[in-house]
Image (spheres, helix red, strand yellow):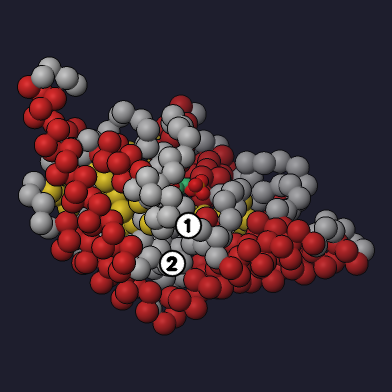
């Protein structure tokens, strides 16, 4: 990924309109307060003295809070250094425990943490089947059923896609896999805190704090009671032998603070209804433009709108919006700045040209109707301007 210095809005007084919550979210107040508390708890949670016990108790309390969000018991929660690590622990830990043998089923729209991990497993001898999605961006459970074999150890599928927001039929896929004797890992990084994940019957469930108002570099893996996986990090016996190393207490407490907020929001469901309205407002507003395509259909996360603007380069459009203080992204954050089109969109059968013209708007805590209106106004103006420039560039031989 290439980086470039942040561009200040053209009008320095303009408010920053942050519509990239699928990439990461701002830290929420309770998470920040909990991090501060964790910084003060300097004892090692494994120490027997008073300072250690205070840290130990805070860690246990955080584990309970995170277990409420994820479902399961506190003993089933393993703290990790983020979503990618949780996913690697789930996939590699499962196959390492089984001698790197057997078969993994996953899908072509997974996050690179899953796909790269699957490729690494394959190099070690694990058979891997990567299923194509439907053109809507959803995985058909019938394809999963057809891919299951007697030696299938694990099915890894995401709860919702980070680029399109397409919600996957994970409950149905889990039932099919379990009936065939396979384990299930669900990448719930995009949904934890936004959709209920506690009732998912997956054996392994990955989440990441920075996607729901917590700090970056902290995540968790829910490991079903009784399921043995091999630790990737060897050392002390922390996390019940599943992840060695002195715990990141400020980070873990921060994640627990964000989890408590998310559990409350999920209970009253108000945020979801509000985001559905924001989604409709954005789509209706952009509807004045011709030649646009919504990359997915229902069921979809109300927070995510992925749109292709015919004849426009998404990275140029995102840069123009950035100069007006509006943060959006092209595909996933990991693809921003890369010239290669998104593997998710191309797997769905979207043309290279359309994939390179696709922008993702994603809402979160603090997104208002005013933000959406500002984004619509700026996007419509920018798309019209870029479409005007393009024929001129073509006529004058520019590229
Ligand atoms: N899985 C999905 C679906 C994601 O969107 C992301 C991050 O963008 C990850 C996994 C990786 O999480 P992390 O950034 O915490 O490593």
Give whichever of 95, 288 is nearer the camera. Answer: 288
Query: Does residue 80 appear anywhere in the picture?
Result: yes
Identity of the residue furthest to the top in this view: 397
Q: Position of residue 116 (x, y in %)?
A: 43, 35
Tell me how far mark 1 sits from mark 2, CA to CA. Answer: 8 Å
Q: Residue at x 23, y 61 (%)?
A: 282
- Crowding near pointer 2: few (<14 within 10 Å), some, many (20+)? some
Q: In the rendered structure, find residue 25 and report the number of the disc placed on it.
A: 1
Vertical order, 5 against 83 (above or below): above
Q: Secondary structure at mark 1?
A: loop
Horizontally, residue 79 falls left or right of residue 306, namely right
Q: Secondary structure at mark 2?
A: loop
Q: In the rendered structure, find residue 191 and report the number of the disc placed on it.
A: none
Give whichever of 96, 285 is nearer the camera. Answer: 285
Quadrant assignment, res 10:
top left
Q: Residue at x 44, y 44 (%)?
A: 8
Quadrant assignment, res 48:
bottom right
Q: Position of residue 196 (x, y in %)?
A: 41, 70
- Crowding near pointer 1: few (<14 within 10 Å), some, many (20+)? many
- The earlier-in-sequence mark between 1 and 2 is 1
Q: Position of residue 104 (x, y in %)?
A: 40, 42
Report the residue marked by disc 2.
Answer: 365
Horizontally, residue 71 falls left or right of residue 384, namely right
Horizontally, residue 16 falls left or right of residue 79, namely left
Identity of the residue furthest to the right in this view: 49
């Amino acid at each position: 990924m290439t980086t470039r210095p942040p561009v200040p809005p053209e009008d320095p007084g303009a408010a920053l309109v942050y519509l990239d919550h699928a990439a990461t979210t701002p830290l929420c107040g309770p998470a920040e307060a909990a991090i501060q508390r964790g910084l003060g708890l300097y004892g090692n949670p494994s120490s027997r003295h008073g300072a250690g016990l205070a840290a130990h108790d805070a860690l246990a309390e955080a584990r309970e809070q995170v277990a409420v969000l994820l479902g399961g018991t506190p003993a089933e929660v393993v703290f990790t250094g983020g979503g990618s690590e949780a996913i690697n622990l789930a996939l590699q830990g499962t196959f390492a425990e089984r001698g790197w043998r057997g078969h993994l089923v996953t899908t072509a729209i997974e996050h690179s943490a899953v796909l790269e991990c699957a490729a690494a497993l394959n190099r070690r001898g694990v058979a891997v089947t990567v299923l194509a999605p439907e053109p809507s961006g959803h995985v058909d459970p019938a394809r999963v059923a057809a891919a299951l074999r007697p030696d299938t150890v694990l099915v890894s599928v995401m709860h919702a896609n980070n680029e399109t927001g397409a919600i996957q039929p994970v409950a149905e896929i889990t039932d099919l896999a379990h009936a065939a004797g396979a384990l299930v890992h669900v990448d719930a990084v995009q949904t934890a805190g936004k959709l209920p994940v506690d009732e998912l019957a997956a054996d392994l469930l990955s989440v990441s704090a920075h996607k729901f108002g917590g700090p970056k570099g902290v995540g968790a893996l829910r490991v079903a009671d009784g399921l043995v996986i091999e630790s990737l990090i060897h050392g002390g016996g922390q996390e019940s032998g599943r992840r060695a190393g002195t715990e990141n207490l400020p980070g873990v407490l921060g994640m627990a603070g964000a989890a408590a907020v998310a559990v409350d929001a999920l209970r009253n469901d108000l945020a979801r209804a509000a985001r559905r309205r924001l989604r409709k407002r954005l789509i209706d507003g952009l509807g004045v433009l011709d030649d646009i395509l919504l990359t997915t259909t229902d069921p979809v996360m109300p927070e995510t709108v992925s749109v292709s603007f015919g004849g426009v380069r998404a990275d140029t459009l995102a840069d123009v919006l950035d100069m007006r203080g509006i943060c959006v992204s092209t595909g996933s954050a990991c693809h921003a700045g890369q010239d290669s089109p998104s593997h998710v969109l191309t797997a769905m059968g979207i043309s290279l040209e359309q994939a390179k013209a696709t922008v993702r708007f994603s809402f979160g805590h603090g997104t208002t109707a005013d933000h959406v209106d500002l984004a619509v106004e700026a996007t419509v103006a920018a798309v019209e301007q870029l479409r005007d420039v393009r024929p001129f560039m073509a006529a004058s031989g520019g590229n």
